[in-house]
Amino acid sequence: MKKISLLVFSALMLFHLSFNPVAFCITGQEVLTEIQKRYEKTNDIEANFIQDYIGKGMKQPNRGEGKVYLKKKGMMRWDYTTPHQKLISDGHTLWFYQPDEKQVLTSDLSSVLKERAPLAFLAGEGDLSRDFNFLNLKESVSQKVETYVVELTPKEALATFSKLILTADRKTFTVLQADVLDGVGNLTRTRFINIKTNVGLSDSLFQFAAPRGTEVIKMQEPSVPARGGKEPPSK
């Protein structure tokens, strides 16, 4: 297994949703400031998602899709319809459950946040301006929506994460897509659909108990798949 999923990292950027600053001649730093302000006011999120892992040299991307629930203090739940799996955190423990293989991998979430400063932001303890360098701001126009595209790099050098690209609706600043690139050029793209914020998600949604007959494996370091599909254990 690889270290904690880039998919999780990019998709947790959903906490940056739905703010409405004046969008006239806005700078990249102003975008980041407004994202941070809105993030601090967002308690929970639910959305449908589509994730594509585009590996360097791959002919076709690996796709995962389903529904995600996020809540402050590190709580999250990914219910995949493709492939059949779940990724759940109660803010302390991270579970990666593969029903077809009757196996669940567990990791300590606190060690994940300790090792990855950008992930602390996603757990409600970080800051965009502190943890990221602003790289570029672009505007994009499609038939459906006008967007801002913000490129960021982590201030702490990481082999598994070199750049984050957020695509946000230009009028509402809702994050529609998050792209994460690793150090060798592999891309994880997460698109969000039917987004709802501050819906009052219960903490019980983020609990997990392994079904009878399921093998439970405690990982020595934070480990979940790095894309929307299964991976063999690491060597």
Image (spheres, grey):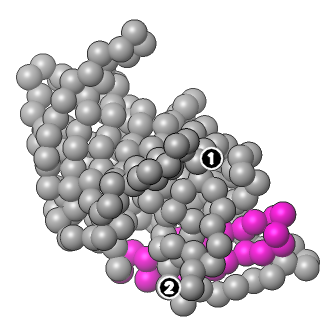
Q: Is residue 28 left or right of residue 12?
A: left
Q: Position of residue 219 (x, y in %)?
A: 59, 86
- Residue 4 at x, y = what percent? 48, 70
Assign a secondary structure to mark 1.
strand
In the image, what residue type sits under mark 1?
A: Gly
Q: Quadrant of residue 173?
A: top left
Q: Is residue 234 above or below residue 131?
A: below
> Residue type at mark 2?
Glu
Q: Which disc, if any, is residue 221?
A: 2
Disc 1 crowd, CA 10 A, few/some/many (<14, 14-19, 20+): many
Quarter of the image containing the C terminus? bottom right
The answer to whether residue 122 of the structure is visible from this angle is yes
Point out the stretch of residues depicted in magenta: 90-114
Q: Which residue is found at the position 57% from the left and 75% from the top?
A: 1
Question: Percent from the top left, x then y, of residue 228?
Answer: 59, 53
Residue sitting nearer the eye, 153 or 182: 182
- Residue for badge 1: 64
Q: Earlier in the sequence, mark 2 or mark 1?
A: 1
